[in-house]
Image (cartoon, rainbow, N blue to C red):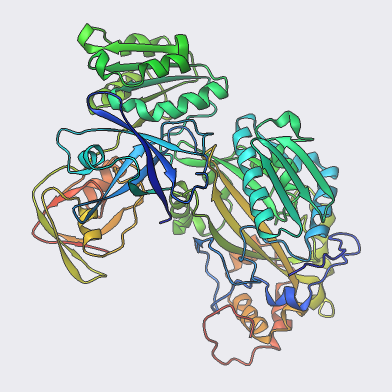
Amino acid sequence: MALAFKQETFRNDYKYSNSPNAIKRFPFPFAEDQYMYSVNIEPHVKGKTGSVSEFAFDVDEHYVGECLDKQLTLDLDRGRYAALPHMMDAQWDFVELTMEALSNDYPEHFSLKKEGLNWTWENKPLNIKQSFVFGDASTMPMDPFEFMSKQVQGDFVLLDQRDETLYADAGFVTSQADWSLAFDVGMSWREWHAPVPRATELGVMDRALKYLLNLQLGSPVRRLNWTMTVNPRLDTSPENYPLWGTDRNTVNPENVADKVHLRVELQSLFRLPRSNGIVFSIRCYLMSLRELSSYPRWAKRLHRVQKTMHPDLIEYKGMTKFHPMMVEWLSQFDDGSAMAVGTQPE
Amino acid sequence: MSMIDIKVAAVEQVTPLVKHFTFVKRDGSPFPAFSGGSHVVVSMNVGGRVHRNPYSLMGSPADTDAYHISVRKQEQSRGGSVFMHENVEVGTSLQITYPVNLFSLAKKAHKHILIAGGIGITPFMSQLIDLNRLNANFELHYAFRSPEHGAFADKLKAICSDKLHCYADSKGERLDLLALLSKQPLGTHVYVCGPNPMVVAVIETARNLGWPENHIHSEQFLSPGIGEPFKIQLAKSNIEVHVPAEMSMLEAIEAAGVEADYLCRGGVCGRCEVNVLESDGALLHHDHFLTDAEKAAGKKIMPCVSRARCDRLVLDL
């Protein structure tokens, strides 16, 4: 299916919306009426045709807009990209993984030609053509990881595995939900998960780490994570808190449906071959409450999930200010009748 | 678990006890690249029973046209290594797992000391290529019984030049671990692969010299070992499985048609860990994964290498 890329902005005038097809394929994360923090990792196998998990990396109608926004964020703050020197093999692993996946899965938009180590990459939507020698960073206009991170939707962290844990030793992070690469680079698994309430005491993080240390080449995994964001803003970084934090005060009963967005992260993890590292990919999907309510089943489910949310999590996810208004607006879709388990739209 | 279909492209007798095998993919496509120190698990059908043995990948990690392993014929083989030596020839089809690395190089090390005993040289064969490519500071110390058992010594000389130090036991050449490890600069990592006494000696020498634990790396795949036969009950599957003397618990579970998770099959990775629901005797833990406290608690067991001396052992499978 040929994709029509939209012209969008993720700041200032917030010119952003989802087409009916994008709403339908949205990775709605709530299968049950109550939300509980869990590992919820599953194999990242090929999903249904047209779904966000059909391919290793999802490219959708927001591709061009998101890639331009990444560049804007990086131009304003070079600290959004970082790579420690020992991560160069992992950088090339990332180049190979993403170039092969995109050119195989979206041949009308991307192509990769290889003659031995002489590779030529073409990205038609962004109008990029680059020949280079695989493994020789001097033949690239910038770090190989930076080059490709800019051309795939979402954020990427390259993890080094040592001392029986994982270290976030490289990253390209411009659309994060209130965390910072500059704070986290070089940190270990336990260090960067320390703020997550209730997860440590449940042993969730230890189990997930054990699982990931055994992650296998050729068998990637994925999970969904979520939060709520005011305005369709990709860059909700702590560094820029003054630019977006106060938006939480602008929500009122009249605009809550259009301002408050469900933000879902499709997180996938791939073992990398040469470096034995892991790439952690965080792809963000945004949908306003109004768009979401085009499927009343989703609105009804979200109402129940939000209504029963633990106060610690409401606080952690930064929803305290607008949470009651959101629950109130969603309540119109909830008749109280029982709902079957599942995330399907209707 | 994803598997790769391969066929054997070449077999070479390297020493009286070691054969070298070259694998290519059956569909002709390239293998994935891998990192130095990786292994694959080879599945072989030995008289109707599936054997799965881990072997280190030896070639250049950048060579994706072929994978290379070497197999030492074990004197007390449970069948796998003898099968590889006597039944596997050019053209034989086999299945292997994707590469797994449980013995990777520490990328931030300032210096690397590699110590190999006998067939323990195999994981280093690929690591050396990575170390050379990264222009790393390293030394390889390779001990073997006698020159005819020093597999790959010539090849290693070509790769390592003056960084290679060989010790032939028959010539009275000994590796002095204390002297070697006591003179290393801060930030040095030591890696050892070889027979158990050698692995233990390196770890203990380094510890006694005050080396930090995360600078000491070892790899030693355990064979499941032959023991007394026993019976297990699988609670979820609701069946009883007999574990014969020369079969591992994991193999017996698989032979009974129950799918169990695994990765290294050598007691290292922890992937096959299973909860013990009930037991009335002794669990014989042989793995390197569980902590001493976990072993003593008796709530978990690694069925790939461990056994039991129980009348009743119920597993959560």
Query: Is residue B193 among the parts visible in the rendering?
Result: no
**Residue B317 location in percent, x, y?**
27, 64
Give A114 or A218, whichever is nearer the viewer.
A114
Q: Split into 4 quadrants, where in the image is the C terminus of chain A?
A: bottom right
Task: Identify the residue at horizontal 83%, vertical 59% (top origin).
Answer: A65
Task: Identify the residue at horizontal 21%, vertical 39% (top origin).
Answer: B86
Q: Residue furthest front?
A: B91
Tell me if residue A199 comes above or below residue A275 in the rendering: below
Q: Residue furthest right?
A: A13
Total number of numbered labels?
A: 0
Residue A224 located left or right of residue B166: right
Q: Residue furthest top?
A: B172
Residue A316 located left or right of residue B106: right
**Residue A333 location in percent, x, y?**
68, 88
**Residue A30 location in percent, x, y?**
58, 74
Residue B124 located left or right of residue B88: right
